[in-house]
Amino acid sequence: RHAAGVRLYRDGEVTDLRLPLAGVASVVRCPADRLAAGGGFFARPAGAMPPFRLEEDARALRLVGQDIVAEVDKATGRIRFLDGAGTPRIAESAEPAPIPGVAASRRQGFAIGATERLHGLGQFRAPVAEYRGEDVFLAHANSDAVNPFLASTGGWGLLWDTGTAAFFRSRGEAIGYHSVAGDLVRYHVCLGADMDAVIGRYRALTGPARLLPRWAYGYWQSKERYGTQAELTGVVDEYRRRGLPLDAVVLDWHYWGENDRFSGMTFDAATFPDPGAMVDHVHARDAHVVISIWPAFGPATAIYRDMAAAGFLFPGRHWSGGRVFDASAPPARDLYWRNVKRGIVDHGFDGLWTDGNEPEFQSTGERYGTAASFIANGRSAAGPIDENLLTYSWYQAKGLSEGLARDVPAKRPVVLSRSAYAGQQAFGAITWSGDIFASWGTLSAQVVAAQNFAMAGIPWWTCDIGGFLVNHRYPLGLADPAYTELYVRWFQFGAFLPVFRAHGTHVPRELWRFGEPGTPVHDALEQALRLRYALLPYHYALAAEAALDGGTPLRGLAMDFPGDAAAQRHPAQFMVGRDLLVRVVDRPLEHAPADIQEFLPSRAVQGTDAPAAEVAYYEGAGFDRRVSSRRTDELKMSWSGDLPGELAGKPYSIRWTGRLRAEETGAHTLVVQGKGAVRLVLDGRTIIDGASGAAVNDGANGGVSFKAHDGDARWDVPLTLEAGRFYPFRLEQRQPTPDVVSLWFEWITPSGRARMTPPAAAAVAPTVEVYLPAGQDWYDLASGRRYPGGRTIDVPAPLARVPVFARAGAIIPMTPGIDRSSARPDTVELHVHAGRDGRFTLYEDAGDGDGYRHGQCARIPLRWDDAARRLTIGARVGSYPDMRPVTRFAVRLVDGGEAHAVRTVRFDGAEQRLDW
């Protein structure tokens, strides 16, 4: 026993078991000589831990703490975790069986309940709604951001905190983790009565979420990219001229000029002659500017020279020609921050967008290649990179957040990040889902990814509305009504995300690019935009709850309806707070896309004896000399960075071998596009053997520069597949023209084909299915119509409408008509939905700065007593500088019957009651 817990010695290893917080247990298991370095990011000093008692009998040793008991079986050394009432929640089990093809350095198994559902783990390009029976490779890529916290409806969460890449496997009543590097097991168990309590304890362990400035919950206008200072300021001016809501504009990369000055914290004088004046112009329009920075620097920059002189640059080459710095070294973070502050922040920019921070070297299109390129750099200040593979963005966000909080206290840290790790919520970090491709399948996947990321404990998430890359499937861009329909539905989804941000390349994203007022697409976008701003008091109150009370604004249905099995069959639905249910329209209802193929999900691309396929690279167009090989679960080559550096300037060949796992039975179509000669052998039969015309480097080479499939050959192969069956494949590409890269392997599944067929035209608007969870009535937010729960209904879904329902008892504050977050209208509407008791807490503060963390905020509790038909506006608690002493509330009772008169209340901070 020691002051913080116990240490158990067995078979040459030590297990350190602690109860650092109420409801939390932390376990480190490693060789005895490694224990001193085993604490990780979230270790707490013994003096800061709550008291516990030690109990022992012939069978077990028990650490009994607040709301948790950790019981060690003396015979096996395995640990079982029980809640404060003595109910077992999760337990260590026998070491899980090896996964074929995975050379795991450490493995750990756990026994779980038979019926609980598993969520979290981060955000993935090919997500699943629930992890029962699934395998997941926990590693970062451009569109995969891992936060290895698994949350269960069984009242527990588990943070697999080794920092290494790992394989997660769920089978029956067992889960297992297989770390691929290091000799350390470190995990934390969080117990709670429900998923909110479990996530709250994850936050208590890893750090409370930072509240973003109020403007960050408004609308961010972005694209790749605003090329000049005048273009950026002109966009803000146009939003204000048109009276369209806006709070932020984003300056993407290349403002520094050419790649030799890549992210050097400087501005090209020809295009951005006065960045300070540009920011001042935006601020004068009551808006804000977020700017892109990277962890890589061009060789002509001062920061490159300083980092190189100090030995802080990794040896691997970045695709820009520069190098990436070691963010795990505190002096390197300090040097980075000094350059960011002097070159960026001191001009007045309001937020930092940290792009490419997996980190990216040549390509981060998929997880295996991303991991390999980082590991190839050997060591970082934190130790061997393969043992610290997931933590780069945590270090970077930490350094930036600490610098912002210290040196710019009037502004809350805003750090938009392409990657994640546990605890990043404490740094004001917002994760976005990377360079995703525009398609309905991607939209559906993003809805699921958003929910799992939120249930992994980090509340701030967003995505590129409309997809970053458009022209792969929509080469006509905004001229294609099939794309603009997709954009509208994606925009409606984005309007309910914690951070509402449009971004992408190939097509402009400003609202007027989609038509003028009075045209259907423009009006649908404007309606969604104005709904976001009408609901801004609701969103900001949820954000404050996340920061101050450990809440989760965007919520999978499992959080609020864990006992409703039907709710789990509707992944396109989620809750915003506990009172609003959103159903994303995730299929076309008007225009069928011309290209309906989707990328094969990573789980469908497996190796013959491993979780992923093998890709081998050869010099020469005839497989002349093998250069390298690795694992991959993606069958795509879209830019030159996808090739090993040894093949630059040379003809090359590539061979993928593995198995395709069919997920459905029925008629499929395989779609392959590319340049050069392509051969595909599937299940022992050659089904493609052909070539494109003479290849030139014509623009289909690179994510941002890709314009269309000019010069690509295309093969569409119809065939029938059987669900669950594995089909051996060999895919080969031979390219005699150096530096030309294009190969895309996709499929059309039976369900995908059906979903992409709009319903037949009818006199009435098309509808979508909405499931209303059981246990309460629900109100259509737009019409006020009341529906009983526990059933599925068909809801009209014309283009301008996103189905949103308020549950009975909901009190929804609204400010219709505002066009910026700073607006303080004289009247706030309160929409009270009868049918059960309800409560909500309005939150107010200065909107920025650190005051809220020191009590400078105000809360107004609202309570609805359904039996008495009484709304109580409770006494205001707290204050903040320049707080408006009087607020006028316009209260509307919604009960599904005749419209009720609006009751207006002058609220001066004292409790008031309204009876109906």
Image (cartoon, helix red, strand yellow):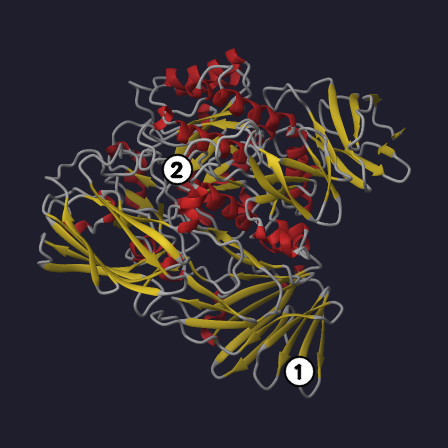
Q: Is residue 367 visible?
A: yes
Mark 1 and mark 2 lie on one chain; the one further toward the N terminus is 1
Q: Report the residue that reaches farthest toward the bottom.
A: 58
Nearest the viewer among 423 and 400 is 423
- Residue at the spot 81% in from the left edge and 42% down from the top edge: 836
Location of mark 1 (residue): 60
Image position of 11 with respect to 427: above or below = below
Vertical position of residue 887 compared to residue 301: above or below: above
**SS at mark 1 in the image:** strand
Badge 2: residue crowd in 10 Å (few <14, some 14–19, many ≥20): many
Would you say 363 lies left or right of 462 here? left
Cβ–Cβ under 8 Å for marks 1 and 2: no
- Residue that label 2 marks: 438
Q: Quadrant of the C terminus?
A: top right
Q: How many labels were placed on the picture?
A: 2
Q: Nearer the viewer, residue 518 or 371?
A: 518
Residue at position x 80%, y 30% from top? 897
Considering depth in this image, is 96 or 311 the residue closer to the camera? 96
Residue 89 rendering spot, x and y as whole percentages: 65, 68
Q: Is residue 158 left or right of residue 549?
A: left
Front of the two marks 1 and 2:
2
Disc 2 marks a residue whose amino acid type is Ala
Residue 862 found in image quarter: top right
The residue at 57%/39% (across/down) is: 768
**In x, y percent, where is residue 904?**
82, 20
Q: Amino acid at mark 1?
A: Ala
Q: Quadrant of the N terminus?
A: bottom right
Tell me which residue sits at (47%, 75%) in the image. Answer: 96
Would you say residue 677 is visible in this rendering? no
